Amino acid sequence: MSSEVHENLEKLPLDAWHRARGGRMVPFAGYEMPVQYEGIMAEHLWTRENAGLFDVSHMGQLLIHGRNVDAALETLMPGDFQAAVDMKPKYSLLLDDDGGIIDDLMATRRGDGFYVVVNGATKHGDIEVMRRRLPGEVVVDYMKEQALLALQGPRAAQVLETIIPGVSELSFMQGAPFTWNGRNLWISRSGYTGEDGFEISVQATVVAELADAITAHEFAKPIGLGARDSLRLEAGLPLYGHDLDTATTPVMAGLTFAINKRRRAEGGFAGAMRILSELQNGPAQKRVGLEVDGRQPVREGALILDGEGNEVGKITSGGFSPSLQRPIAMGYVASHLAENGTALKLEQRAKLFDARVVPMPFVPHNYHRKGAA
Amino acid sequence: MSLYFTKEHEWIRVEGNNATVGISNHAQEQLGDIVFAEAPEAGRSLRKGEEAAVVESVKAASDVYSPISGNVIEGNPALADDPAIINNDPEGAGWFFKLEVTNPSELDGLMDETAYRDFVASL
């Protein structure tokens, strides 16, 4: 419990705003970021019941454009960029030649180009990879002057509609441009908590004003990184650098929904040979959700053992679920042990824990589907 | 009765030959929501500075060290079912364990309450 000196860390556009609201700042992805305000548990539960405002301005916002940009992106990612519908965000993965995951991201066709949001810790590497591997006529612009907010929770639409009329018309995984106080915003109905919600791209110069307007609503509060992590874990969503990295493939990670029929038939993306083979024959390891007995959290790095005590995998994310009031985890295990209900042991600091493979999400998603109330 | 603190943010309250150990209010604030705590078993003999108990918040796991040497008389039975008691009353009902003191001279190196509050303010 020592106070760390934060050197060489960048400040978010909302740095002073977070501090003024009691945000406890910690180093994350090269930035000083708020891990919590009043407490992770309370912030987590607030987001599941109301609306939580997250500052995710550390993430990289890119605009990729140029001749045949969709076909060019398809060489690096397994998504169907040619069939991508305007203003519909799609989850995809930046892959290396062995099919390992360089990053996971959201890509949205916006007119002639693609608006791509990548992880904060990996953004500079991603930009470098894309610029090196895409043809010369495709340009990758890093939108450094844009901040990014996420408003998440069952009351997110109710809250945001009072500030930006019309947003509640968006359906899940749909985006559109809006204006607010004469400023241009890009808003999509998407997020990383398993709840309904929005991600709002806004000029850094006005983000504090917008954050003030949102949190002035009685049902909206600022939420830190700590709850962001516990919310996404309950939602079964992988975190890059923990559950995904260059040693994992989309098939191992259970992200095959991001590879459609045409791309499976045609291939032509980085790592296609390995990934198509894994799709056909199954991967050696799979990402699974685990329910842990007792109350003690089992965290990243713990070993996963089979009934005979052989090491069969590792925990990549784990913690105490505030919504379920029990420890949950995800990790990779040998594929024959990935069936739901499989009993496994976890080993952490020389202590053994009983665990079972369970389906994810741990807490049901609450997305706003078209036609739903 | 005397109250002492360590730089690792444990407190120890000494009454005669016995002592009670817990973590400070500052420590629980830094940890945040505590979801698990494991106190040592009665009969265990602890050396000064030895890992005696485990405390875990939503965010992280931490060890609680024994401020002095001694034999564990009892662990707080309330911690297993209600670890949040450490957040709510860290220097009272949220105590971790009671010790029979074996080497009282080890108390000399610890901080009194005023020195500890100054130490925390300097962090």
Image (cartoon, coloured by chain):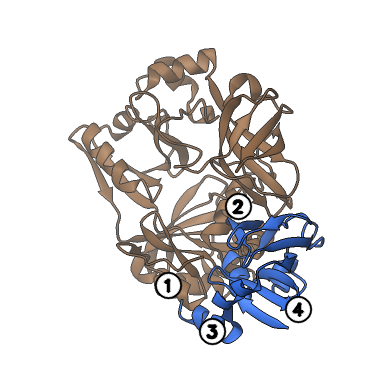
Chain colours: A brown, B blue
Residue A6 falls in image quadrant: bottom left
Of all chains, the one bearing label 2 is A
- Using the numbered discs, state the Cα–Cα distance from disc 3 to disc 1 in whole angstroms: 40 Å
Name the residue that disc number 1 marks.
A208
Query: Is the residue A188 above or below the residue A151 in the image?
Result: above
Verify CB contact (< 8 Å) between mark 3 and mark 1.
no
Give a yes or no on whether discs 1 and 4 share a subunit.
no
Chain to which mark 4 belongs? B
> Is residue A125 shown left or right of residue A312?
left
Q: Nearer the viewer, mark 3 or mark 1?
A: 3
The residue that disc 3 covers is B115
- Mark 3 lies on a secondary structure that is helix
What percent of the width, then of the height, locates residue A91?
47, 38
Crowd around label 3: few <14 · some 14–19 · many ≥20 (10 Å):
few
Picture quadrant of residue A144: bottom left
Q: Is residue A209 left or right of residue B64?
A: left
